[in-house]
Amino acid sequence: DTGVSQDPRHKITKRGQNVTFRCDPISEHNRLYWYRQTLGQGPEFLTYFQNEAQLEKSRLLSDRFSAERPKGSFSTLEIQRTEQGDSAMYLCASSLDDPGRGETQYFGPGTRLLVL
Amino acid sequence: AQTVTQSQPEMSVQEAETVTLSCTYDTSENNYYLFWYKQPPSRQMILVIRQEAYKQQNATENRFSVNFQKAAKSFSLKISDSQLGDTAMYFCALNAGNNRKLIWGLGTSLAVNP
């Protein structure tokens, strides 16, 4: 068990550029979550997948944000036409849905995005 | 609506002493789970402890234990024998009913002083 990994760990981009982040969950986990965290705040939910299906999207997720999880393995989060307000830490978490026992989300190290 | 409240933005404790972090929550669901996560400065969010609402027994993980008061909707974290490595932001989180996302408190910044 190597844990949840995210790539890149840091990204600096200019306003208007597109960026893509990758998350590799713990191998047997069927759920994958994306959160955004700004300095001094708790994480805010963005979206989640069960296997390859995207089951919920936050209203925070504007049309510029898109996430995929092809084949139910790794996931990508793309932000188009970045804005300075997109600067944040983007966290990925994965879990195993265990009916009757609930689930526990395990987090990756995050991708810190800075939009100049 | 489901909410999580952490009323202590900052706390400090001397090394080897005990500290308790407070958390209250609100949900109308009967089936829910509560979590404490730790986030050291510039480091990864780590699970500290988890509590199932249907269990009366308070969860314990080594030096970390919770005081789960279901009627009062209170879920405090006690850290015994505090260590310098416990310095971190501590978040309380709720997962309730069919709502898959975690609902988070604003966090408590804990400093362990030598």
Image (tube, coloured by chain):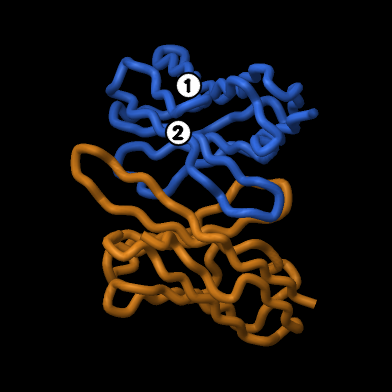
Chain colours: A orange, B blue
Q: Amino acid at mark 2?
A: Ile
> Which x, y percent locates residue A14?
76, 83
Which is more toward the observer, B74 or A111?
A111
In the rendered structure, find residue B49 and report the number of the disc placed on it: 2
Q: Which residue is mark 1?
A: B66
Which is more toward the observer, B86 or B104?
B86
> Which x, y percent locates residue B15?
72, 24
Question: Quick one: label 2 or label 1, which is nearer the N terminus?
Answer: 2
- Chain for numbered disc 2: B
- Report the quarter where the C terminus of chain B lies: top right
> Which x, y percent locates residue A6?
52, 69
Q: Residue at x 33, y 30 (%)?
A: B29
Q: Amino acid at mark 1?
A: Val
Dot 2 and dot 1 within a common chain: yes
**CA distance for labels 2 and 1:** 8 Å
Which is more toward the observer, A5 or B56?
A5
Placement of A89 over or under B30, stated as above or below? below
In the rendered structure, find residue A109 and report the number of the disc placed on it: none
